[in-house]
Each structure stands twice: as structure tokens, then as C-alpha cells.
Amino acid sequence: MLEQIDINKKISKEKYKEEITGLTAELGVQQRNLREKKIPVIMVFEGWAAAGKGTMINNLLQYLDPRGASVYSIHEPNEEERLRPFLWRFWVRTPEAGRIAVFDRSWCCHVIDNIRKKPLPDDETAKAYADINAFERQLADNGAVLLKFFLHIGKKEQKKRFRCLENDKTMSWRVSKKDKKQNKQYRIYLAEYEQMIRETDSASAPWYIIESMQERFAEIKILQTIVQTLSARLCCPAHSATAVGSYAAASILDAVNLARSMKQDEYSKRLEHGQRRLRELEHLVYQKRLPVIIAYEGSDAAGKGGNIRRVTANLDPRGYEVIPIAAPNDIEKAHHYLWRFWKHIPKAGHIAIFDRTWYGRVLVERAEGFASDNEWQRAYREINEMEQHLCAFGAVLIKFWLQIDQEEQLLRFREREQNESKKWKITDEDWRNREKWNIYRQAVDEMLCRTSTASAPWVVVESNCKLYARIKTIETIIKRIEDKL
Amino acid sequence: MLEQIDINKKISKEKYKEEITGLTAELGVQQRNLREKKIPVIMVFEGWAAAGKGTMINNLLQYLDPRGASVYSIHEPNEEERLRPFLWRFWVRTPEAGRIAVFDRSWCCHVIDNIRKKPLPDDETAKAYADINAFERQLADNGAVLLKFFLHIGKKEQKKRFRCLENDKTMSWRVSKKDKKQNKQYRIYLAEYEQMIRETDSASAPWYIIESMQERFAEIKILQTIVQTLSARLCCPAHSATAVGSYAAASILDAVNLARSMKQDEYSKRLEHGQRRLRELEHLVYQKRLPVIIAYEGSDAAGKGGNIRRVTANLDPRGYEVIPIAAPNDIEKAHHYLWRFWKHIPKAGHIAIFDRTWYGRVLVERAEGFASDNEWQRAYREINEMEQHLCAFGAVLIKFWLQIDQEEQLLRFREREQNESKKWKITDEDWRNREKWNIYRQAVDEMLCRTSTASAPWVVVESNCKLYARIKTIETIIKRIEDKL
């Protein structure tokens, strides 16, 4: 999930100046309101060595009233701390109502740093994450606002920053052996950080990934996130409501290369080969009693239907089912929103293809206001729990997000309108949704970020070229099933 | 925890008739209100074989409008069900908004029945319980009311009921080999049931233990619990508010034998011996770096102070600390209620004795309305989580509830008033609390039930005789520390 993020985001000096003044003024007002309303705030900074945690915290402090904020730098536990349960040193530092506590590194160190020194057994890691989640939930239930930032930079950039520091005599001491090891083993650390974020991301204590290649960008995104969160909590809209959050959105989608395409020749060859292999796998899936669930989501006119038809073209109809999901009917509305999907969970040995899914909760229901804020925010966890349950049962769960850009969508809408046989596919609603492009984009991005898990990762399918998209989905399905068998 | 419950409760035929009419009328009204307000209700019946689950469900159905209720009898999963994740068959049976679903056995079967056939590995058991908790939380978050009943009978009674059934030709088929095995291995099952209740007890889906030796009593308690819960949910007080719940309270305390006492001779001998041993253990605790936490709670004038003084009389003051807990000060009030206790967590190797504890949240704060319903109901889980964290760190956590009866308390209050040197100990507040004896009693009972865990069990100390109480605490402490060392 971290890898899919476009970390190279930048903003200009002029834009920075324009933003920073409004944001810091707003933050000042908010801090006073927090004190008055006795709301405690906890901010956590985690991230790569040399990603700029110290700088960001220093900058942030400039904008806060120092009488209402404390910073805690978390290092190796000392003697006093080692003799107590690991949460102790964090519990005693939780802020008083109305105050802000900023943590430079956090309770997650207990898992992340221990993994390096002396790996915790799986069981203990799970327990430690459960302890951490309970800790954060208890604070949030008691009224605290929790904001967790992960500062993300690439391997090369980290190496460059280390070299810069080392060349500066007054700074060279800051680069430790441990830091250098982190750079060498970047990919291993990456997986661990992803696990940490996945395990401890929750509606009441969410992680925000901060693209930190450029200091200016990182600072603005952090401030925007803080101001936005506090303003929601203080129940008063931020002054610059439209600007706020504009940088917070669409990190994963930004990195998608929609120019990817495929020629007809190659397509035909790979399609035929893929469809033949899928048929073979369908039989193996049945013999081995493997449950397979394929979930399709995507922008309107991204080509879900055509894509699914290519997947199923050569399959034995007794072994698969396509489940089209429309707006819920009255009976479905009278149940938990996950109920109608549970009803369609395939038997082991069968393949279920969902054309739209349970993710409607955090997409259309969020964007259109059919679900309350609390409902869709809670849904990330609920969905992750459902998918975890399916995967633990042994299911292969494949999730596709079919992405096209606005221009391509316009072309396809127009084409549908002019084509008698496709005219039914385009409705006023499609045009309305199109106007909310940016709202949907943010919802999609947050969905990809919060529900991409190790056992059920999202696959973003670049779909401006339908041929490319179809081959990518078919070959992904083949690979995932083969891996499992 | 189940063992400590007084299962022999009975009510007379007259009392039963008096109660049942009001309760069932109320239930009828509530069912109509539930439908109108579109609230789904889920009731679960678990318990010992032959404890009367079937009878209770049958009776209950007589009082409900059958058009709004469904009963699901849960057996071994069939072919269709085995081919899907274990929660599937329960998800698809969750009731529509406004309807009542009654489960004869439940999703807990997955763990409980599997343990018998092919024990799940620890890891899987923990995962299954996590799945169950997530399932129940998701339903409750969506507005469902969940009520879970555990029907409890003793080993002898179960055997007697089996014999009765077997002697009846039309009924003998109902006693299976599995049932008989349960009776033979009663104690093993008991531990498993306790684990099940502990792992899946939550504020939004609580367990209610039903003493089921007498059918009349069990039925009234079940109906009272249902009416009480629904009335809280429907935000309208039940008609017979004072009667409701009168049987629901004080199951554990009822079973406490306050007549236990000890002669001065024996006391002196055992006290001297115990205090000497405690001193030795204090040194071992330090050498082995064992953290020890001793928590004292009890009625006013139950003798906590004197009891603690006997424990510490012979200890080296560098190795222990007594932490008296009064009402929180302003700084403490501005933090999470657990914060002030975290500050006093002893270093490994030290003994901390809390004179009153974090349980104030579910005792005085509940009874006096200092904590909201949501806050004290949530606290059972929060406290269990904190204690789990301490125990996982290796702490020995010993929790004493010092119990006296109302007469003994009155005697001691009077004595304090008349004794110049003790007069300061008695305040108007003590007299006021005394008037709320039954409210406190229910709070204590629920606390004992919901927070007695395998690693941190409550020890109820019969304290009408101070000598007996002191020896019991000292010897309990010795045993728990020795076991751990």
C-alpha cells in the first residue's frame, strides 16, 4: 500500500506561503477552542529515519501556544520503563483535557523496534497490536482526538539524506548504524511499516500517510489534516473549508499510469491463453474446494461489465456466479449492510464474481450521504474484519479497482448516448456522479489506502485501454489462484 | 466465576404468577414498539445440556407475536454450511429491523463444540473469539439489541435430569452420549464455558447467567432481563420499574457464607506464620523482579485498612507501597479515569497495594451517577484490557472484595461514632451510601461477574469476622505469589 503512493508530490513556494498563513491562524483559534472545550489531542509522528519527523514537529510547535502543548521524544525504554508494561510510559504521558501531546515516535515502537532486535513471536505481535488498539480506543472513547502521521520517503531519497547529513560535520552523528541498516533493508522495513499501519488504523485513531519528499508539501498536508480533523471535532467548519484537505486526497490514484495500453495482436494471444488457463483452474478450484471471490469496483463506464464477460467467457457455468449489485431493496435495507453480501458468499470450490460490492458503503453511500459519517468511517474496519474472516477460512479474495480518467469517461458517456444499443447504460445519475468526480476520487483513495491488506490487497487496473485492463485482471486472477493452489 | 454463583434460587408459585402477568404484558407492548422503531433484537440461549434451553425458548415464544419472531436451532453445520466461513450461517439469519431472532445455541458453538471434537489451537481459538466479537459489535453498532443467556445448573442436577429423561421412554432418545460425557467432565466444560463468557462478554452484547435449578426462577429472571433491556433501549421505563431486575441482582454475593469466623488462638498462630512468610516472599519477589499488585475493594467499614496493615506489618518498606485512592482531584479528573492508576503501577520486583481501585468506576461512580451509563458499561472491558496487559507483562494481580452484611455494618458504624479515636472514620456520606445498599450490591455483583478472569480472578473475602478475613487475604497472597514463583 505504501509503495503505491505517489511520494513525489510538491507545491510551489508561492502556494506554500498562501496556504500556511490561513492554516496556522486557524490552528491557533482551534487550540484555544480545544482548551475551552476540554478536549485532549494526541498527535503521533512515525516514519522513515531522516523523513523529517523532527523538522515537522518543530515547525508545528511554532504555530501552537507552548503553554498548551507538550512534546515527548520516544527512545529506547529506560530502566524505570523496562520494569513496567510497555504501555505504562505512554499512559502516564497522555495529555490532560484541553492539552495537546505530540509524540516523536510512539507506542508502535514496541513492536516495530522489537521486530528488528529480537522478533516478537507472531502471537505476541498480535497481542501487542491488540493492546495498542485497546489503548487508542480507550482514549478516543474518553473524548481524545488522535492523529497519527506516517512520514514516507523512498529508499534513494533516504540514502541521499543520510549522505548529506554525514558530509556535515555537525550533523554526522545523527546517522546511526541502525539507520543505515534501515536503508539497506528498506523493503523489509516497508513490509513491517505496512503491517503496523494496517493493524492500528481505525476510525477513531486513523493513520495519515504523508508524502515527505518535499518538506513544504509534507508540512501543508500535515497542517491541513490537523485543521480538518479538529474542525470536524469542534463542530465548526474551518474557515478555508474548500482549500482544506485538497492535498490530502488521492495519493494512490495520482500514481496510477493510465497511459498503459495494449495492441490488438498481443491482446488476442494473451486473452486466449488466459481464458484457457482460467478454465483449467476452475476445475482445480472445485477439486481442491477453494473458495474464490472476485470483487469489481470502478468509475462509471470504466468497463467492469465487459471485463467480467472476458473472465467468464470460457468458464463452466456450474462453477461460477456473477452477482450484480444494485441499490439495496427494502428487505436488504432492513438488514445490516453486509448481510446481502454474506448471503452470496460462495461455497468452497466455487467462484463468485461481484459486479460492485460491499465497498459501496465507503463510495456511493459516503459520497451521496446515504451513510452517516460514523457509519462509513466505521465501515473500513467492518469490511476488513469480514474479509479477514473469509481469508482465514481459506478464500482467495481478489479486489479490482478499474480506473479511467475524466476525459476517457466523457468519451465513453458520449459514445453510449449515440449508440442505440448502449443508450440504456447511461442515465442522468451517471452525469450527476461525474460532477462529483473529486469527491469520489477522495473516497476511492481512502478506500484503497485503508482496506488494502496483506491477504486481500487492492489491484488498481489502469482501464483507459480496455484491452490492457482485461488482460491485467485475467492474469492477476490466474496468478492469485495459482499461488494459493 | 460460574462456580461462585448461587444456582439454587427459587421463587414461589404465587410470586411467579404475580410477576409473569406484568412481564408478559409489558413484553407484548415492547415487541410492537420494536417493530415500529425498526429495532432488530437477537437473543441467544447457551448453557448446560438439560438446563432447560428448549423449555425457556418455548415459553418465551408463547408471549411473543409469532409474526415478528423466528427461532433458529443450531446443530452441527450441514454440508452447505461447512463449505463456508463459520459465521456465514449466522449472518444470513440475522433479523430484519423490527424482528426478533432467537438462537437455541449460537456462533459460540464453533469454539465450544470444536474444543471437544478437535481442539482448535490457541491461536485459532483467539481468532474465532475475535471474529465473534467483531460480529456482535457490528450488529450492535448497526442498532441491534443483543441478549445472551447462559443457563446454569450443577453437576448433580444435570445427572438427575438425564436419569429422569432416560426413564421416560418417549424422552430417552434426547440424552446423547455427548451429553453424558459433559456430565462426567463437568469441570472441564465449566472452564470452557467460563472462557467463552469471559471472551465474548461486552457492553453491547452482554452475557446473563441464569440460575436454572428451578424453572420458575429461570423464566422470571430471563423475562425481567429482556423487559429491562428493551425498556432501556426503547427509552421508556418499564411499567413495574421497581420489580424489574429484582431477581437479576446479586448472584455471587448471595452465595457468600458470611458466618465464617476464626478463634483468636488460631488467628495469632496463622498470622505470625503468614507474616513471616510474606517477608520472605517480598525478597524473592524483588530478586525475581516480579511485579505484584494487590487490589482492595469492599463495603464501607468492611475492614480494608486493618486488613492491609496486617499484610504490611512485617514487610520491608522499600519493597512495597500502599496507595490510598480517594475521589479524583482536578488534575486527575482532566485525564482518562485509568490514568491515575497507571501512574502507580509498581516497578517489577515491587508490591503495590491499592486501598480502593480503578473499580470505583463501576461501583461508586456508577451508583452515584458520576459516570454515564455508557461510561461504566464500557469500563468492564477497559478494566479487563488493562489487567490483561499487566498480567501479560508478568504481574501477579490479586483482587479482594471484602464483604460484610448490613447488620455488621450498622454495628461498626455505631461503634465508630461512639469511639473518639475512630469517629473521624464515619461521615454522613457513609450513612447515605448505606441507604443505597441494594444499588451497590447489584453493582458489586455485576463487577465480580464481569471482571473475574482466569489471570485476575476476584477473591471474595467473608469479612464479618475480621480475624478470618485477615488470614484469608494473607494466605491468598502467599499462595498466588508462590504459584507464580
Image: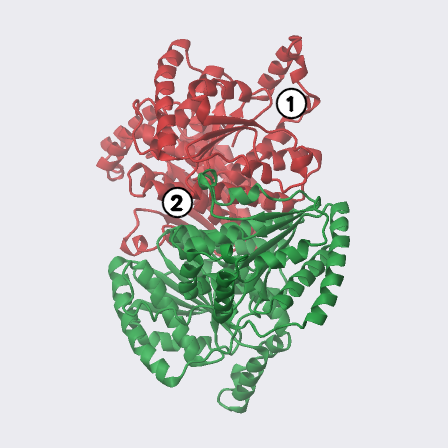
Chain colours: A green, B red
Q: Residue B82: horizontal and vertical position, in percent?
A: 67, 38
User: Marks 1/2: CA distance?
Assistant: 39 Å
Residue at the disc numbered 1? B183
Residue at the disc numbered 2? B357
**In this view of the protein, can residue A18 be seen by the observer?**
yes
Residue at (76%, 47%) from the top-left corner?
A288
Q: Residue B415: horizontal and vertical position, in percent?
A: 27, 30
Q: Residues within 10 Å of mark 2 (few under 14, many from 20)?
A: many
Judging depth in this view, the residue of A45 and B268 nearest the camera is A45
Disc 1, SS: helix
Residue at (50%, 77%) from the top-left corner?
A51
Disc 2, SS: loop
Amino acid at dot 2: Thr
Chain for disc number 1: B
- Taking the image as shown, residue A137 lies to the left or right of residue A324, namely left
- Taking the image as shown, residue A28 lies to the left or right of residue A382, namely left
Q: Earlier in the sequence, mark 1 or mark 2?
A: 1
Residue at (69%, 34%) from the top-left corner?
B79
- As drawn, the label of residue B150 is none
Judging depth in this view, the residue of B469 and B452 nearest the camera is B452
